[in-house]
């Protein structure tokens, strides 16, 4: 067992719930403190209520549990962010700044903060978007992530805070549902295929976006955090991607399992957000620096999603 003690914010969320379980397996149950603004549905281990805008409580928990690493997952995502720009800025940037101050003061070993493909705007090549592109995002979420990346780099350069980050593409997982994102359709579509064999999609059929399956996203996060410091050459954030597909392509893949599955396209305001993001990413820097490599493509992810969701439905029915 390793001696690090870890605090996670947003531990009840789509990524948080899976990452918490994996970190507990790797670092020992009692060495991982889950935090969230709401109580979890099930008691799975050490947990504290934490509003990340309350920097004092955050610092106090870090002292109380002798925390050495923080995974700061709390964020308001792209679609929700457009409905509350000021709050999105305050939470996404304000809480990161509080953490950076705490990390510097308490000499934390390492911090992880997620960035996003939302940092890119429509003025970059949409295919194989380079790691070092001009960052002119169109959403407040994207603006907050560009600011976050720059603050992260600043605290590393100026104070030596070991902060590491990944620009997550859309993340598809079976445990929890995402909320408030533009890529959320790609999770919901699997649930609806099983439930009703029909789905209403809020993006156009050809809105291709970079995506990743949850096990690959977790692997990337832990590989980045466990890589030797000298391998981390980028202190803003690393682009990574597992695959790219459009709603039409994921539909065709689902139809291999459910031939009668139908999708009705009703694009809304999220279509404009999707159009401003890359269709695919150049993630060679992550591959070269710390060995990023995905295990899943669209076909293998779809097969596993249905296997896991069916298993979950059977277990829930039995309980
Ligand atoms: C969103 O759609 O807002 C997020 C993201 C790509 O960061 N899933």
Image: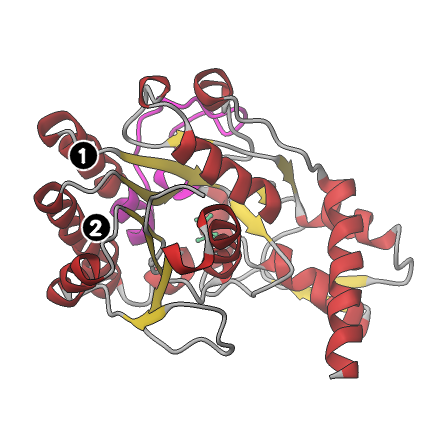
Specify whether residue 117 is painted magenta: yes
Q: Which is the main secondary structure of the residues drawn in magenta? A: loop
Q: Is residue 121 visible?
A: no
Which residue bears the numbered disc 2? Answer: 96
* Earlier-in-chain disc, 2 versus 1: 2
Q: Is residue 261 visible?
A: yes
Q: In the image, 98: left or right of 66?
A: left
Question: Considering the numbered disc 2 on the image, is that residue within a helix, a strand or a loop?
Answer: helix
The picture quadrant where one finds residue 80 is: bottom left
Label 1, secondary structure: give it.
loop
Q: Which mark is residue 107?
A: none
Instruction: Report crowding for label 1: few under 14, some 14 to 19, many 20 or more residues within 10 A (C-alpha).
Output: many
Q: Nearer the viewer, mark 2 or mark 1?
A: 1
Residue 112 x %, y %? 33, 43
- Where the C terminus falls, by quadrant? bottom right
Q: Is residue 131 magenta?
A: yes
The image position of residue 131, as x and y in percent, is 40, 23
Q: Which mark is residue 161?
A: 1
Residue 57 percent location from the top left of the image: 16, 67
Q: Is residue 49 left or right of residue 174?
A: left
- The answer to whether 127 appears left or right of 260 in the picture is left
Q: Residue 184: where, in percent of width, then height?
A: 55, 58
**Side (left or right) of 135 relative to 294:** left
Which quadrant holds the N terminus?
Answer: top left
Question: Dot 2: few (<14), some (14–19), or many (≥20) neighbours within 10 Å?
Answer: many
Task: Look at 37% across and 18% down and name the residue there.
Answer: 231
Specify how the rendered protein is coloured: secondary structure
Please determine whether, in this image, residue 75 is positioned above or below residue 162. below
Comparing 75 with 35, the one in front is 35
The magenta stretch is: 116-145
| C-alpha distance separating marks 2 and 1 | 13 Å
Residue drawn at x 51%, y 62% is 178
């Amino acid at each position: 067992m390793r001696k690090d003690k870890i605090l996670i914010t947003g531990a009840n969320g789509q990524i948080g719930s899976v990452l918490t379980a994996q970190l507990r397996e790797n670092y020992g149950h009692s060495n991982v403190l889950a935090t969230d603004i709401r109580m979890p549905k099930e008691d799975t281990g050490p947990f504290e209520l934490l509003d990340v805008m309350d920097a004092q409580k955050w610092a106090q928990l870090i002292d109380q549990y002798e925390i050495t690493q923080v995974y700061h997952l709390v964020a308001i995502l792209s679609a929700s962010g457009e409905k509350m720009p000021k709050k999105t800025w305050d939470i996404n940037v304000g809480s990161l700044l509080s953490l950076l101050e705490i990390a510097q003061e308490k000499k934390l070993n390492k911090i992880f903060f997620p960035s996003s493909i939302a940092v890119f705007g429509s003025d970059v090549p949409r295919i194989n978007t380079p790691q070092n592109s001009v960052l002119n995002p169109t959403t407040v979420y994207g603006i907050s992530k560009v600011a976050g990346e720059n603050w992260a780099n600043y605290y590393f350069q100026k104070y030596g805070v070991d902060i590491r980050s990944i620009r997550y593409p859309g993340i598809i997982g079976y445990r929890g549902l995402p909320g408030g994102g533009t890529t959320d359709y790609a999770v919901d579509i699997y649930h609806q295929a099983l439930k009703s064999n029909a789905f209403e999609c809020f993006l156009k059929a050809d809105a291709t976006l970079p995506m990743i399956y949850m096990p690959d996203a977790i692997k990337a996060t832990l590989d980045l955090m466990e890589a030797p410091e000298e391998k981390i050459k980028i202190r803003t954030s690393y682009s990574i991607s597992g695959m790219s597909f459009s709603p039409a392509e994921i539909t065709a893949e689902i139809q291999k399992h459910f031939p009668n599955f139908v999708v009705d396209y009703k694009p809304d305001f999220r279509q404009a957000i999707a159009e401003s993001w890359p269709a695919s990413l150049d993630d060679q820097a992550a591959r070269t620096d710390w060995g990023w490599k995905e295990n899943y493509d669209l076909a293998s992810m779809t097969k596993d999603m249905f296997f896991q969701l069916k298993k979950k439905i059977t277990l829930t029915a039995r309980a």
